[in-house]
Image (cartoon, grey):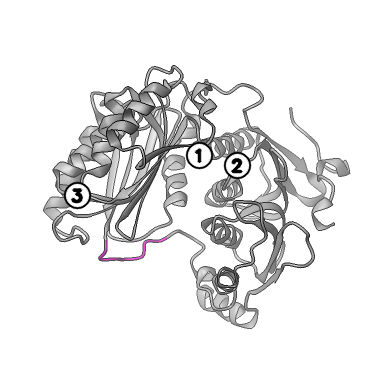
């Protein structure tokens, strides 16, 4: 009955999307109004993030029965969004024709016969990605798409694989059990005391949100106190009480980076908190996010222990996606075993991957790796050139500033992969909230 009532409310108050390219000189303004429901904010941010929009400013208001978001967005080069096809997609994805309003309680799993999804989580160590890819190649599995994160000595991955011969999803239960067991054995290694988990499923899910959920469930935010960050790099997360509004105010200040808003909203949503007012400002090198939050039951953050847990979880969400290391991009014709071969070459040259994004588009492999020296020393660029000569100078390219290779780790030293609206004052500045040190 509750679902039917919510559907009725949505039919009576369909989402409305307004896109304005005139009011702001350097950004496109996207406004979304709709009936309110837990998780809608995350779904809106997810759509914008998946389009690789850069959100420079944001205003959030979802108190009561109505929801309104306003975002200033640009493309990756800092330009307005002018492609009419892209803008029409935004209108449909967030407007009355969208289905996102019906699926905000969980990411779900949409069935597909095109590939099999493998979720992995376990202890991080140098060379683990290479070992996992070698096992998948041995088991005649081809990795189409994958994303891998590491944080606080833990590693998580979501991979989409197909059968080498048929090119379709793997359906044989006995074979799937064998894949799960062999991958789990590799994840455990000789460390039987640390939990490792492998899940195999047929379906499509939102990879980045699933990675956040996996690492949150694994309690990576509790593991390790020395993350290798100096005070300038460390995110500054505080929570204060606003007694007059019976809510808590979360303030986040940290170095800006892509998808930062998605990561923080995803974490708060999956912890069952509602952001009912908020301001986002990411113009310049530093991002400033401020959220008024309540628990889904309407209560603010009640205790020091709860406050500390929220802070730890937000800090972990921010640091999981830190792109440390030298960025390498590989683009070539896809083939079975390609990922296994490339990661083996990295391992043999004492490089460890701290984060990876693997994609297959029109029979082309487009992969991004962030690599560091496995011993913690700066990456020797002569080794990089040697690897490029072996793989192919035009196939593997160094992206970004090569000086990144000389920077110290931005996260745990043991981290290795598997080897006018927006100018409102701060809530704290109103003098209506009490701060905790």
Q: Position of residue 212 (x, y in %)?
A: 47, 45
Q: Decide: marks 2, 1 in contact (CB < 8 A)?
A: yes
Q: SS at mark 3? A: strand
Q: Which of the pair 154/260 is nearer the observer?
A: 260
Question: Residue drawn at (31%, 38%), measured in percent from left and top?
Answer: 392
Residue linked to disc 2:
257
Q: Quadrant of residue 417?
A: top left
**Neighbour class for label 3 at 10 Å: few (<14), some, many (≥20)?**
many
Q: Which of the pair 176/6 is nearer the observer?
A: 176
Q: Position of residue 112 (x, y in %)?
A: 29, 66
Apparent side of residue 195 relative to residue 44 in the rendered image (left or right): left
Of labels 2 and 1, earlier in sequence is 2
Q: SS at mark 2? A: loop
Q: Which of the pair 74/138 is nearer the observer?
A: 74
**Neighbour class for label 1 at 10 Å: few (<14), some, many (≥20)?**
many
Residue linked to disc 1:
321
Apparent side of residue 380 relative to residue 242 in the rendered image (left or right): left
- Which of the numbered marks, if any, corresponds to residue 141? 3
Of labels 3 and 2, earlier in sequence is 3
């Amino acid at each position: 009955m509750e679902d039917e009532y919510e559907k009725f409310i949505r039919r009576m108050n369909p989402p409305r999307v307004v896109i304005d390219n005139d009011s702001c000189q350097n950004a496109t303004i996207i406004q979304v109004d709709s009936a309110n429901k837990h998780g809608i904010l995350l779904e809106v941010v997810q759509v914008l993030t998946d389009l690789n929009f850069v959100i420079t400013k944001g205003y959030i208001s979802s108190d009561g029965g109505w929801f309104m978001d306003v975002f200033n967005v640009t493309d990756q080069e800092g330009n307005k969004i002018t492609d009419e096809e892209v803008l029409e997609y935004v209108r449909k994805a967030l407007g009355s024709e969208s289905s996102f309003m019906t699926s905000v309680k969980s990411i779900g799993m949409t069935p597909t016969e095109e590939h099999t999804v493998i979720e992995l989580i376990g202890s991080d160590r140098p060379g683990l990605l290479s070992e996992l890819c070698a096992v998948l190649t041995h088991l005649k599995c081809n990795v189409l798409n994958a994303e891998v994160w590491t944080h606080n000595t833990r590693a998580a991955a979501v991979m989409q694989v197909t059968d080498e011969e048929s090119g379709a999803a793997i359906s044989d239960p006995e074979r799937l059990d064998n894949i799960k067991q062999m991958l789990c054995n590799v994840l455990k290694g000789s460390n039987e005391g640390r939990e490792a988990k492998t899940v195999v499923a047929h379906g499509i899910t939102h990879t980045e949100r699933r990675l956040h959920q996996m690492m949150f469930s694994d309690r990576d935010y509790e593991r390790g106190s020395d993350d290798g960050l100096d005070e300038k790099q460390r995110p500054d997360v505080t929570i204060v009480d606003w007694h007059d509004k019976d809510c808590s105010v979360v303030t986040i200040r940290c170095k800006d980076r892509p998808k930062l808003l998605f990561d923080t909203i995803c974490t708060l949503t999956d912890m069952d908190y509602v952001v009912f007012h908020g301001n986002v400002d990411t113009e310049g090198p530093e991002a400033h996010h401020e959220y008024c939050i309540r628990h889904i039951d309407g209560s603010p953050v009640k205790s020091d222990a709860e406050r500390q847990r929220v802070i730890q979880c937000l800090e972990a969400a921010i640091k999981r996606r830190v792109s440390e290391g030298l960025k390498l991009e590989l683009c070539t014709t896809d083939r079975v075993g390609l990922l296994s071969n490339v990661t083996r070459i990295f391992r043999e040259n004492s490089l460890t991957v701290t984060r990876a994004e693997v994609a297959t588009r029109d029979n082309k492999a487009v992969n991004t790796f962030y690599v560091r020296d496995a011993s913690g020393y700066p990456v020797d660029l002569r080794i990089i050139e040697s690897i490029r000569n072996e793989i192919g100078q035009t196939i593997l390219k160094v992206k970004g500033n090569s000086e990144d290779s000389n920077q110290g780790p931005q996260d745990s030293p043991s981290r290795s992969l598997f080897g006018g609206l927006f100018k409102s004052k701060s809530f704290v500045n109103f003098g209506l909230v009490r701060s905790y040190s």
